[in-house]
Amino acid sequence: MHKVNLPLGTRDEFGIRARRKTKLINLIEEELQARHYMKVATPLLEYQEVFADFDLKQLRTYQLLDHNNETVVLRPDLTLPIARFLSANNLKLPQKFYYVGDHFKIAPPLSGRYNQLTQAGVEMVGYASNKAECECLLLINRLSHCLRLNKIQLELGDARFADSVLAAITSNEKLKTQIKEALYQKNLPHYQQLIAPFASQAVAPFLKIWPRLFGSFEQVYQQLTAVELPDAANEIFREITQFAVWAQKLPDQQIMLDLSTAPPQAYYTGLTFKVFMQDIPDYLFSGGRYDKLLKNFQAQLEPAVGMGIDIDLLVDQKTLITTDEKHDLLFFEPEQLAQVAKICQTYPELELSLADDLRHAQRNARNSQVKLYRLTAKGELEDAT
């Protein structure tokens, strides 16, 4: 038989990993439903304009033509489809939603990453209060405990911070973009060259240390209190500090700050957060505030806070214990099917033996180290091991 391989970047899931993934998703869904989140399931295919905020070519998305010659994509993100869903359905806001689904991004060659990824997440739409961010921070702490994660690192930032600094020193939009790119990519020689014209300004000491402004909350706080910030940036830093102080009171997590890295997505407009574990380079949770969620779909903007959960990365941590459960077997003949149905209602843990005859069923039971039962003429169970 000709062997048919999978497309690059995909995989079959089975056995222990598949069970662990199912258990993980069920646990997360139970927790979110208990907190009164409404489940939303959007289709894998969306029109490309749903992702107008993305550079689809740079993201290496899967793009197809439908029967009307319209371009559709396999969704590379799960938040913007929720925005499209809200614009198409007249739901009363505010509301809390959650989702679980796959998204698709073609990974760079030889990166070892998969193109199809499973993500869960929450969207709190219509909530302008910072209590929505607090809800996310509480959820992170609660889910981390439920998933038996080791001590996590909660990293806080703000999507407005870089723009607030640069707006105070230049009106040149091209220069602002160049500085941010050099900063985010840690291209220090180019960054130093770009900030050289501002050496005489009061913000110069800050600009000098900006690429290194990441680490523990205490460390970054001490660095920033020793330099002068523009007023708008200083106000944003005070907000981040307040969230850090609140989050420090939650158990089993270390609070980090990062003011020199790009936000997780381009549509963020406020506080951002990522969750790491020791020795894991990618983040397990990420999210923040995006108050322009519906800007591409309707004139009425809605404040929103959301968070994505990397299901595949969590599954690979193997923190949830999943074992091969063994079940005793029931040998039966096809004409006993009605009796078997009643027995299985009474003993749902029994597994049907599909062996052709009793001898093979007994051998299978011995190999699996379980008991074998069969039905008597009266329809009662008897030990046939």
Image (spheres, rainbow, N blue to C red):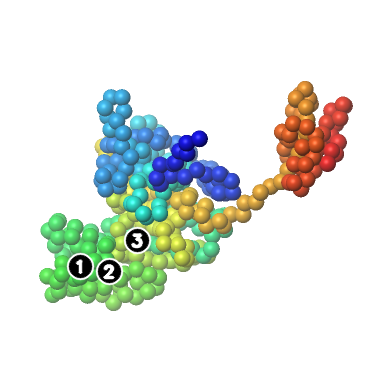
Q: Earlier in the sequence, mark 1 or mark 2?
A: 1
Task: Please report the residue visible at 14 percent of the width from the left and 57 percent of the height from the top.
Answer: 174
Packing grade of label 1 (10 A; few <14, some 14-19, many >=20) is: many
For the C terminus, the quadrant is top right
Query: Cα distance, mark 1 to mark 2?
Result: 9 Å
Packing grade of label 3 (10 A; few <14, some 14-19, many >=20) is: many
- Identify the element where label 2 is drawn: helix
Q: Is residue 384 above or below residue 316?
A: above
Residue 288 in picture, x, y percent from top left: 37, 53
Q: Is residue 256 above or below residue 332?
A: below
Residue 102 in picture, x, y percent from top left: 43, 42
- Residue type at the position of mark 3: Gly
Residue 262 in picture, x, y percent from top left: 30, 58
Packing grade of label 2 (10 A; few <14, some 14-19, many >=20) is: many
**Mark 3 and mark 1 in contact (Cβ < 8 Å)?**
no
The residue labelled by disc 3 is 157
Query: Cα distance, mark 1 to mark 3?
Result: 20 Å
Q: Earlier in the sequence, mark 3 or mark 2?
A: 3
Residue 123 in picture, x, y percent from top left: 41, 45
